[in-house]
Image (cartoon, rainbow, N blue to C red):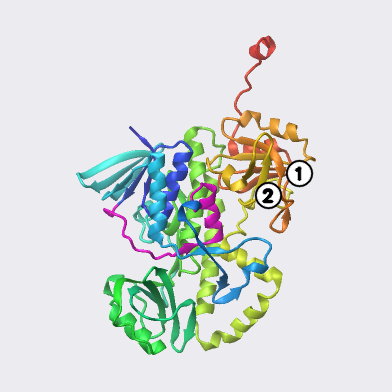
């Protein structure tokens, strides 16, 4: 039987996408070439917006007590505590833990991750994609309506789709090692030292992660050639401390190579995560942006499969997420220069330290790093919240029910219309969504707070499944127009019993 979607890659992005698709009712398969999760963790946390995305699906609580972290831009600290909105990121969460939680979620949803299944090619036609793979039982193939490549920086899906991957090649590198028994002191944000930068922080109980940028070491594009002795020698040269005696759990390297796919869609083939954009790691933005790619694409693909997607909805994935990727590339390249350059960059760092004391500048840079400043074009809109995410921490006192957070309203992965004001003709606004009751939830009540961050909460708000505001009141624009733009045509009205005229017409 033909699948709805095949996802290639079982990293955080592929797993998140599979869950989003399943919430939307799609039949999805995940193919992963590795026989088991690697247990390695290039990423050790996620941004505020990614934390909100997990919260929207009831997943954040599965991480247990998390450590909320202050932020920086290229090593220049930003005091998040002075900002109206909460930009604090999550740190100390190894990527393998994120993958374990997401895969457990998929099992609950009935989605299987097919490990030891390496995709070798595919053929796309007007109405389907046939995927070839090598699996435990030998070569095989499966057909789906759509294919999504979440298969990393060296994406086979991207290559076979003929999608360009322009950008900038490596000019510098960073080297990391997870070690036990090093005895070194923490340097959680990093320190510039003669010849480069060093960082150290506790990854797990007894395990320290060290990160080095050494101007004298070449960028290691091929991580298989890297040896711990190179890292230990550089650490001693730069800090005067020896870590040669430490037990090594894992070593890796990365460079400042920065590239972005020219398009995120070719017909029935899509890209997300590192398959669509790569850059020097900076504040856990890479995985976090990839997870947001998945949440943007998932509900749209599911809507198309369910048959109610309006024209152009799938194209909005590229038009919304490609600009986010462009900004990601720009800000990580800027941070790399600011963070890793030598003393010649110190005058600019001093200017930046002065600038971040200005609230508007701090708010802008914090929003860039945290992901809270992402704004989508929602068409006709005149409310200041339209196109932005609505804070999942807002509390609604429901009519006929107890208090509920916005994040909880989004757990099912469905659009939500919240009617909470007194100036919107409350019941009339709710009735306007009657034709979409099969796909849009309506909740009425009153807000527990009058503000969301630095803005007043809307009297009524239409939320997409990804948590972004598609329409808000007061507005001179029609709610019906927003419903049709994002959630398709309404279902036909069912005539009341005995209404002969309605039945005939």
Is 189 situated left or right of 428 in this image? left
Q: Nearer the viewer, residue 385 or 337?
A: 385
Residue 38 falls within the magenta-colored stretch: yes
* Residue at x 55% of width, y 54% of height: 52
* Residue at x 50% of width, y 49% of height: 295
| Distance (Cα) linking label 1 and label 2 | 10 Å
Quadrant position of the N terminus in the picture: top left
Q: How many marks?
A: 2
Q: Nearer the viewer, residue 229 or 249?
A: 249
Is 419 situated left or right of 196 in this image? right
Residue 467 disc label: none
Please tell me in which quadrant of the rendered image residue 480 appears.
top right
- Tag 1 and tag 2, C-beta contact below 8 Å: yes
Read off the magenta span.
Answer: 33-60
- Label 2, secondary structure: give it: loop
Residue behind mark 2: 386
Pinpoint residue 29: horizontal percent, then vertical percent: 36, 42
- Label 1, secondary structure: give it: loop
Pinpoint residue 454: horizontal percent, then vertical percent: 71, 59
* Residue at x 34% of width, y 55% of height: 156
Q: Nearer the viewer, residue 343 or 131?
A: 343
Is 132 situated left or right of 490 in this image? left
Quadrant position of the C terminus in the picture: top right
Residue behind mark 1: 475
């Amino acid at each position: 039987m033909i699948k709805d979607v095949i996802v290639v890659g079982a990293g955080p992005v592929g797993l998140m996408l599979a869950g989003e698709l399943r919430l939307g009712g799609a039949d999805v398969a995940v193919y992963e070439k590795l026989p088991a999760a690697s247990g390695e963790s290039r990423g050790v946390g996620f941004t505020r917006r990614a934390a909100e995305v997990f919260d929207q699906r009831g997943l954040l609580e599965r991480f247990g007590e998390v450590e909320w972290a202050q932020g920086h831009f290229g090593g220049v600290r930003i005091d998040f505590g002075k900002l109206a909105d909460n930009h604090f990121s999550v740190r100390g969460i190894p990527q393998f833990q994120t993958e374990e939680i997401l895969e457990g979620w998929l099992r609950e949803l009935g989605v299987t991750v097919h490990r030891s299944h390496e995709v070798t090619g595919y053929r796309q036609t007007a109405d389907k994609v046939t995927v070839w793979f090598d699996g435990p039982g030998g070569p095989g193939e499966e057909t789906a309506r759509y294919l999504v490549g979440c298969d990393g920086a060296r994406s086979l899906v991207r290559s076979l789709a003929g999608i360009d991957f322009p950008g900038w090649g490596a000019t510098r590198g960073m080297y990391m090692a997870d070690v036990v028994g090093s005895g070194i002191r923490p340097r959680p944000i990093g320190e510039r030292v003669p010849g480069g930068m060093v960082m150290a922080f506790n990854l797990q109980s007894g395990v320290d992660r060290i990160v080095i940028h050494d101007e004298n070491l070449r960028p290691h594009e091929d991580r298989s050639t890297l040896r711990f002795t190179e890292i230990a020698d550089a650490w001693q040269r730069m800090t005067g401390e020896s870590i040669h005696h430490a037990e090594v759990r894992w070593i890796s390297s990365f460079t400042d190579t920065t590239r972005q796919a020219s398009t995120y869609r070719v017909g029935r083939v899509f890209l997300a995560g590192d398959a669509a954009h790569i850059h020097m790691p900076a504040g856990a933005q890479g995985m976090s942006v990839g997870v947001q790619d998945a949440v943007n694409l998932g509900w749209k693909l599911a809507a198309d499969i369910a048959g109610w997607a309006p024209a152009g909805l799938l194209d909005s994935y590229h038009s919304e997420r490609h600009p986010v990727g462009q900004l990601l590339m720009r800000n990580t390249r800027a941070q790399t220069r600011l963070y890793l350059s030598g003393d010649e960059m110190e005058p600019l760092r001093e200017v930046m330290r002065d600038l971040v004391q200005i609230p508007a500048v701090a708010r802008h840079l914090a929003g860039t790093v945290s992901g809270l400043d992402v704004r989508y074009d929602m068409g006709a809109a005149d409310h200041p919240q339209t196109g932005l995410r609505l804070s999942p921490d807002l509390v609604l006192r429901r009519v006929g029910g107890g208090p509920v957070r916005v994040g909880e309203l989004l757990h099912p992965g469905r659009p939500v219309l919240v009617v909470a004001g007194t100036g919107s003709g409350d019941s009339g606004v709710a009735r306007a969504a009657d034709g979409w009751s099969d796909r849009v939830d309506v909740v009425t009540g009153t807000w527990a707070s009058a503000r969301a961050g630095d803005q007043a909460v809307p009297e009524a708000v239409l939320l997409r499944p990804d948590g972004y505001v598609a329409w808000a009141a007061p507005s001179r624009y029609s709610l019906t127009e927003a419903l049709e733009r994002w959630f398709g045509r309404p279902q036909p009205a069912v005539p009341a019993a005995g209404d002969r005229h309605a039945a005939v017409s």
